[in-house]
Image (cartoon, grey):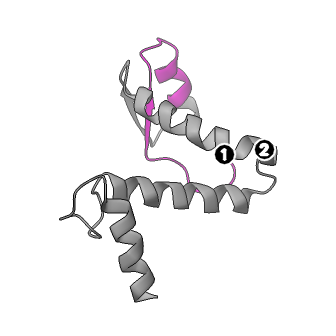
Amino acid sequence: MSHGRRPAEITTDKAPFHPRILDELLPEACHVDAARENTRIEADHGRSKARLRPLRGLKHLRSVQTISAGHALVQNIRRGHDEIATDIDPHLRLAAAFTELAGAV
């Protein structure tokens, strides 16, 4: 927590100790307690772990920032949260977005 940006929102399960600990560590962050909200995030996280396991983890904070920013970009494009390729079928959205981005570069 001493490196990088501090989160504005934290989602946890409904364990009774989370609000107290989060108020101590991050009093400015919004705490969302939802029992199953992390399921999709954890499933997404599993793919990242499988990809990074052969590398034996990331050695530098800059690598973590780069990987997580790229991962967030891809997920936002897939889910239609970005202006790129929003009018295309969701299954083809990522390929269309990268084709459009390659043309711009």
Magenta stretch: includes residue 15: yes
Q: Nearer the viewer, residue 22 or 43?
A: 43
Question: Disc 2, disc 1: CB below 8 Å?
Answer: yes
Q: Is residue 18 above or below residue 73?
A: above
Task: Determine which residue is flagged by label 1.
Answer: 51
Residue 10 drawn at (x, y percent)? 45, 36
Amino acid of disc 2: Pro
Task: Determine which residue is flagged by label 2.
Answer: 54
Magenta stretch: includes residue 101: no
Q: Is residue 41 above or below residue 51?
A: above
Find residue 104 and report its image quarter: bottom left
User: Measuring 76% from the left and 50% from the top, which residue is drawn there?
Assistant: 58
What element does badge 1 sit on? helix
Query: Would residue 17 appear left or right of 85 to someone viewing this image?
Result: right
Highlighted magenta segment, given as a residue range: 2-23
What element does badge 2 sit on? helix
Q: Give the residue furthest to the top.
A: 16
Amino acid of disc 1: Arg
Residue 12 drawn at (x, y percent)? 46, 25
Quarter the N terminus occupies: top right
